[in-house]
Amino acid sequence: MDNSFDDQKDRVQPKEQPSGKPRHAEQTKPSHRHAEPPRESRHAEGSPYPDGERPARDSRDARMARHGAATTERSATHRDASPSHGASRSDETMKGGARDAASRASRHDAKPQGKHEAKSHAHEGADFLTLDVSTLFRRQKQHDRRNDATDTGSFPVVKKRSETTALRHSAGQKALTSLLVVLLCMILGFAYVTQIRNTSENFQSLSEDELVRLLDETNSQVNKLEEQKSELQSQVDSITNATDKQSELNDVAKKNATTSGILSGRLACNGKGIIVMVTENQTHVDATRLFTLVEELRNAGAEAITFSGVRIVASSYIVDTDKGVEVDGQIVSQPYQIKAIGNQDSLTSAITISGGIGAQLRVRYNATVTVTSDDNVTIDELAQTKDYQYARIVE
Amino acid sequence: MTAVIGLILGVIIGIFVKPDIPIWLQPYLPIMVVAALDALLGAARSYFEHSFNDRVFVVSFLSNVVTATLLVLLGDQLGVGSQLTTAVIVVLGIRIFSNVSAIRRFIFRG
């Protein structure tokens, strides 16, 4: 990623170092290059260095080559304590820590240049003598810093390009990059604000747990509301039932009232029925015969009956008096007109059946009996209401 | 300076233009923002260290954002999206903190 920023920090270090004292990895490399220029290309290709380390350094190689002699001397100085070449190498490898890959490579490459190494050994003693204490001190310090390095070597270390490359940018490129910087920062600010707005608006950014919790809450709310709903529904049902019952009762009562009204002669009514005319010829017709006539009509299913303008109800009576036939306290004269509402066929046959009341009246009393069917018999005579003295309504 | 101007401009545009984020981008936008913030703070630090390079900044900004997004995308595809998001956020958070502390050392000399 942008380890380059870490490197920008690292870059400060080389600045502090005195020039001509490059880092450890560079120490041996130039010497070998100095000795064997043709090997360099091969080395660069099959580089054992961590990625990027070597190519970045390559730009300096030319410069470093110039310091070849000096650096070889210095590397020799490092080894001066140990008489054996191999021992000093391994010692250095251990110390090298992070750079061990580099040193391994250099060791490998250094083998063919034994002649050169030997030459540098010759310089060694003189160099050690000529160096003053402060230089040695500084070198030691540098060495210590290298040993204390915390770099594990597992992360690629990308070297920043030298200042010269950066300076090579033209003015146009600079403007372009600064424009890009502005653009990128703009995008960042834009995305930031957008994200803020987005987060506060919807559930997309909520975590799974939060969503589950929200869902649970909603579910429990739904359940509560369902309970309330069913409760209210049952209330509505009971009220509706009660209302229904009430109206039903009302209907029944009304029907009953109508039925009993018709039966008791309280209501006028009309419908299909028959009209019977009984006309006496000299012979008086007994009231009992007339009552039989009415009873025959009742048996045939007559729903409402009037006898010469008097409504016949359950308590009606027909008697002979001196003044004539009396029905429910009213004197009626002949011809007697009896109107009955009911099934016309039944009623007609009840009167005209052979040996029936019609034949008796005709044969015994020589009366004229006519039966006419009428589709609209109107009975508007009402029975007088009766005051019940003993009967009481049961509540 | 250009960065600050750009930032302010972006915020203003974001406030006035109310964009509709496509759904596929929604899980990645916060990561992108944090990654970009890290790059910005790294740039600020290098600026204080007098080693700021706008080109490096541009590249690091883009690579930061892309890498973070790709990591989260990978996590989503492997079924560890939320964990990997947390990991990325933690790493970026650590980097942001270290960058801020470096900047602080430069500003307050300690």
Image (tube, coloured by chain):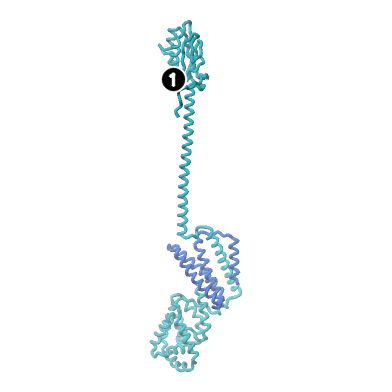
Where residue A185 sits: x, y (%)?
Answer: 57, 68
Identify the residue position indicated by label 1 in the image.
A301
State the image coordinates of residue A301 (x, y, percent, origin top left): 44, 20
Can residue B14 be seen here? yes
Chain to which mark 1 belongs: A
Q: Residues within 10 Å of mark 1 (few under 14, many from 20)?
A: some
Above or below B41: residue B19: above
Residue A215 in the image, given as x and y percentages of width and height: 46, 55
**Which residue is drawn at the image coordinates 44% and 17% (left, top)?**
A297
Question: At 56% from the left edge and 75% from the top edge, which residue is drawn?
Answer: B47
Which residue occupies the extreme front position in the image?
A390
* Residue A263 screen position, x and y as percent: 47, 22
Is the residue A365 above or below the residue A190 in the image? Answer: above
**Residue A275 versus residue A224: which sits nearer the camera?**
A224
Residue A270 at least partly seen: no
What is chain A's hue in the picture? cyan
Quadrant location, the C terminus of chain A: top left
Residue nearest the viewer, comparing A354 with A1: A354
- Look at the picture and state if A54 lies above or below A257: below
Which residue does the image show at 47% across and 68% down from the upper left?
A: B90
Q: Secondary structure at mark 1?
A: loop
Give, as a three-letter code, the residue at label 1: Gly
Q: Colour of chain B?
A: blue
